[in-house]
Amino acid sequence: MIGKALSRTMLALAATLAVGLTLAACGDDDDETTGDDGGETASTAIEANPDNEGIELTIGSKNFDEQFILGEIYAQALEAAGYTVNKDLNLGSEQIALKALSSGEVDGYPEYTSTALTSFFGFAPEDVPGDPQQAYEDSQDEFANEGLTAFAPTPFSSANAVGLLTETADELGVASISELEGATEDLTLAGSPECRERVDCLKGLEDNYGLSFGRFTPVDIELRYEVLDKGDADLSILFTTDGQLAESDEYTLLEDDQELLPSGNVLFVASEEAVEKAGPGMQETIEKVQESLTLEVMQELNARVSLDRQRPEEVAADYLQEAGYVE
């Protein structure tokens, strides 16, 4: 059923798909369009390749809504390209996901350049390149050393962020993380269990910003807004791509004025064995379907799952169809 949320998503898609994407409604009567040289340009639609038949791929993801959506987008796109696809879309944290990939449990999963560089490869947050292309190249090199292949990144990037209710920010009189200094002893910070040891989370806030929280509450990622709404935490680690941020001004993200929380574009990481058995169609398909994933589009897709309670597989299917990748 096409509801309010789908309309929101399509408004965002309409603004971004104009760059390089040809939707059926915008083209000629035929499915193909004519280029400046009089020839026909390729359609954005994914075509099933007989060479992919019988090749099985297992696509994984980490354990939160955005990853579920991305995992579904990639899995469904690969199915459209003719592969036999299995899904393991609730692997857990990045460390668990990487272990699953390295052991062959999955053939590939979406990861963030910032997470890869800081959590896997020992980069300090301040050393993560601000240039997305450089961050991708650094990640690609590091993954290659581990026998893994990183595909080209998404247009959107995501970062951890310290968030709170806007009314709480007003009461505290803070707009940046540094302005929390001296006020956190009586405040509770919520974050994922692994946040304790991550330099782009609690550990970094303590070591780099010098903050000392009254209490740290580990919560499931899905509850990062609920703990604020219920008053169980004063601050929570949020994501800049969260759908809630596109919906209202109820929440405020504090400025990361020391640039501790690096942003990262998503790149699909696959084992060399998977890349070899899948052939070029795997990378071509994945990179094609992420061309229109801007920040605004990703926020809207997240909103449909997190706020409107639609299933990730349905949201992914609608995205692929409306973008012209599948019929």
Image (tube, helix red, strand yellow):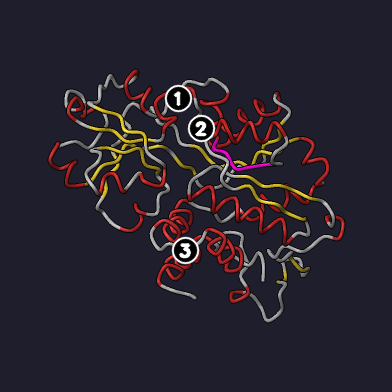
CA distance separating discs 2 and 3: 28 Å
Q: Residue furthest left?
A: 171
Residue under the point 61% across and 59% down? 20
Residue under the point 40% across and 63% down? 308
N-terminal-most mark, 2 or 3: 2
Q: Which residue is mark 1?
A: 125
The reply to whether discs 1 and 2 touch (Cβ–Cβ < 8 Å) is: yes
Q: Quadrant of residue 90?
A: top right
Q: Residue furthest right?
A: 51
Residue under the point 55% across and 42% down? 62
Q: Amino acid at mark 3?
A: Gln
Q: Which residue is mark 3?
A: 310
Q: Which residue is mark 2?
A: 114
CA distance separating discs 1 and 2: 8 Å
Per the image, label 1 sits on a secondary structure element best described as helix
Q: Position of residue 177 (x, y in %)?
A: 27, 31
| Disc 3 residue crowd, few under 14, some 14–19, many 20+, Cα 10 Å | some
N-terminal-most mark, 1 or 2: 2
Q: Amino acid at mark 1?
A: Pro
CA distance separating discs 3 and 1: 34 Å
Per the image, label 2 sits on a secondary structure element best described as helix
Q: Position of residue 265 (x, y in %)?
A: 53, 41
| Disc 2 residue crowd, few under 14, some 14–19, many 20+, Cα 10 Å | many
N-terminal-most mark, 3 or 1: 1
Q: Which residues are magenta?
A: 108-112
Residue 229, above or below 197: below
- Locate residue 92 relative to residue 190 in the image: left or right: right
| Disc 1 residue crowd, few under 14, some 14–19, many 20+, Cα 10 Å | many
Residue 116, above or below 313: above
Q: Position of residue 271 (x, y in %)?
A: 73, 36
